[in-house]
Amino acid sequence: MLDSTPGYSLKGKRVFVAGHRGMVGSAIVRRLAGEECDIVVAPRDTVDLRRQVEVEDWMGWQRPDAVFLAAARVGGIYANDTRPAEFLYDNLMIETNVIEAARTVGVSKLLFLGSSCIYPRLAPQPIHEEALLTGPLEPTNEWYAIAKIAGIKLCQAYRRQYGRDFISLMPTNLYGPGDNFDLMSSHVVPALMAKAHRAKLDGAPLMEIWGTGTPRREFLHVDDLADAAVHLMKSYSGEQHVNVGTGRDIPIGDLAGLICDIVGFQGALKFDASKPDGTPRKLLDTRRLTELGWQPGISLIDGLTGTYGWYLKNIMESQERDRIEA
Ligand code: GFB
């Protein structure tokens, strides 16, 4: 059964976007511009969300009405696999501190953002919300997954014990403006864009793809995610977390081909099977979200083209400026 609270209006509210500098948080800030609310952000040099006292003091001073909890230690398969302590500790601390402070300062609504890696590695596809905790996790990102599962459970526990309207949303793999293009810590979309761009400039005969290229992933543009988050904040109130995706996935090898076409790299793809594939497939069942009245609006091809434009303007141009100034 779906609970909904039509009528949670953001108008005139103080809305704290935790993680406003990240890809997701900055997209939520952009989306909230049309909501006539007062957006509150926590500058990193003022408050470290991993420190309980700093979070309590800052939220006690700012007194937000609503919170989008988008702050997190995030990264792609390699970062998750090689920095397990950071992914577990940082995420547990951030979500615990913000959720508890939200309770003590009387936040009326909080939306927690998780990740589709919370589901079992071999969950039946498409993955329904009920698949949570029904099997073993994907080992490359179990640390991050455990932290995100704890976040869902915190929201549920705070609903039950304190009657707080804290909800959770589980996005599929995201991409878009503001993404991280560093090859060792990024997700696959920005990594392949940066690699294809470099290969094109160098006139390289091939570019390397990690793994076998056979795993399938579902990709959602971050502006769609931000729109879904605002929609759920305003219209959903329930203990069950809600999947957010497009309902379509593609093999990594095909994604690489698409990105090469957009970038204009015409060389070959070389698959490095010594690198991990991660989970074989991760496609979300989004029927619950559809029933709640939301659909994605940005096609993969448009989203990737726009993201490559953002990369050229914001990353390549600034690298060029740094090179000239140095
Ligand atoms: O996006 P990605 O790093 O994360 O990788 P996951 C997706 C797939 O792309 C994997 C392949 O099969 C990778 O092996 N891949 C191919 C590449 N070439 C590359 C490359 O150059 N860079 C990267 N990064 N991948 C993450 C989780 O899993 O998904 C997080 O680790 C989180 O916890 C996130 O849940 C959404 O989809 O495998």
Image (cartoon, rainbow, N blue to C red):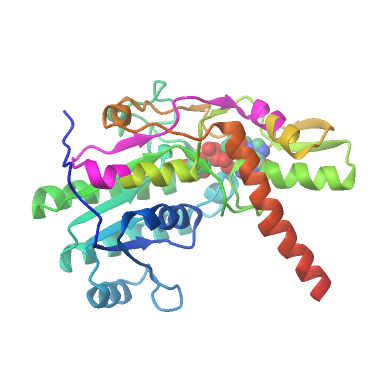
Q: Which residues are magenta?
A: 231-257
Residue 187, x across and y down, in percent: 58, 45
Residue 272, x across and y down, in percent: 73, 34
Q: Residue at x 42, y 43 (%)?
A: 225
Q: Residue at x 84, y 33 (%)?
A: 267
Would residue 247 be counted in the magenta stretch? yes
Depth check: 107 or 92 in front? Answer: 107
Q: How many marks?
A: 0
Q: Is residue 287 above or below residue 244?
A: above
Q: Is residue 237 above or below residue 269?
A: below
Q: Is residue 308 visible?
A: yes
Check the picture and name the quadrant holding the N terminus. top left
Depth check: 305 or 284 in front? Answer: 305
Quadrant for residue 171, please give it. Answer: top left
Quadrant observed for ligand 1 in the rendered image? top right
Task: Give the side of residue 29 with respect to residue 64, left or right.
Answer: right
Q: Is residue 140 visible?
A: no
Check the picture and name the quadrant holding the C terminus. bottom right
